[in-house]
Image (tube, rainbow, N blue to C red):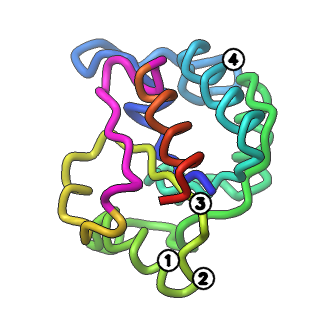
Amino acid sequence: MIFLDIDGVLCTQPLWKPEVMADDGYSEFNAACVANLNALVEKTGAQIVLTSSRRMTVTLAGFQALMQRRGFRGDIRGKVDEATEPNGTSRASEIEGWLTRHGEPARYVIIDDDSRLAGLPDHYRRHWVRTAYHRGLDAAALAEALRILAAGQ
C-alpha cells in the first residue's frame, strides 16, 4: 500500500512560478517522478491510497484516468477518506484514521512532503518518506520507499 500525496511528490513545480497546466486543464506532473512511482508499483505490486487534498475535487475514477494520462500504470485503490472539502483535519490524522478503520497493512509506505507528518506516532512515522517539494519522488525517495516496503516494517 502506498499512501500518496501529489504536490511535492508528483507535481514539483516551484511555488514561485505559475502552475503549468496540461491540455486536460489539470496540473502537469514531473515525468521522472511518475516513472519512479511506476517502478515502485511494478516492483512491489502496491496499490495507491490518495492522501492529497486534490482527492477532494476529483472522483476516484477521474483521478485514475488523470494519472493514466500522465503515464501512471498502477491502480488507485481509494482515497484516505471521502471528504469533498477541507474539514480542518490534518493529513496525519486522516492517515491515522484510515489505518484505524482498515487496519494497518503488513507493508505500506507514506510518500508526502508535508512536514506535519512528523506528528504521526512513531510506529506510523517510520513508514513515511518525506520528499522535497521541488524534487518529489526522486531516486533517493524511491530507494527509501522500496526499503520500507521490502522490510515490511
Mark 4 or 1: the one toward you: 1
Closest to the observer: 21 or 41? 41
First along the sequence among labels 4 and 1: 4
Q: Are marks 2 and 4 in contact (CB under 8 Å)?
A: no
For marks 2 and 3, the one nearer the N-term is: 2
Quote the CA–CA distance across marks 3 and 1: 12 Å
Q: Amino acid at mark 2?
A: His
Residue 22, image x, y percentages: 63, 18
- The residue pinned by badge 1 equals 99
Q: Which mark is residue 107?
A: 3
Percent coordinates x, y for residue 143 in the rendering: 49, 28
- Please say if the residues under marks 1 and 2 sit with CB atoms less than 8 Å apart: yes
Q: Secondary structure at mark 4?
A: loop
Q: CA distance from mark 4 to mark 1?
A: 36 Å
- Amino acid carrying label 4: it is Asp
Mark 2 — residue?
Answer: 102
Q: Is residue 12 left or right of residue 102?
A: left
Q: Earlier in the sequence, mark 3 or mark 4?
A: 4
- For the record, the magenta segment spans 125-139
Residue 75 got which mark? Answer: none
The residue located at (51%, 76%) in the rendering is: 98
The mark nearer the N terminus, 3 or 1, is 1
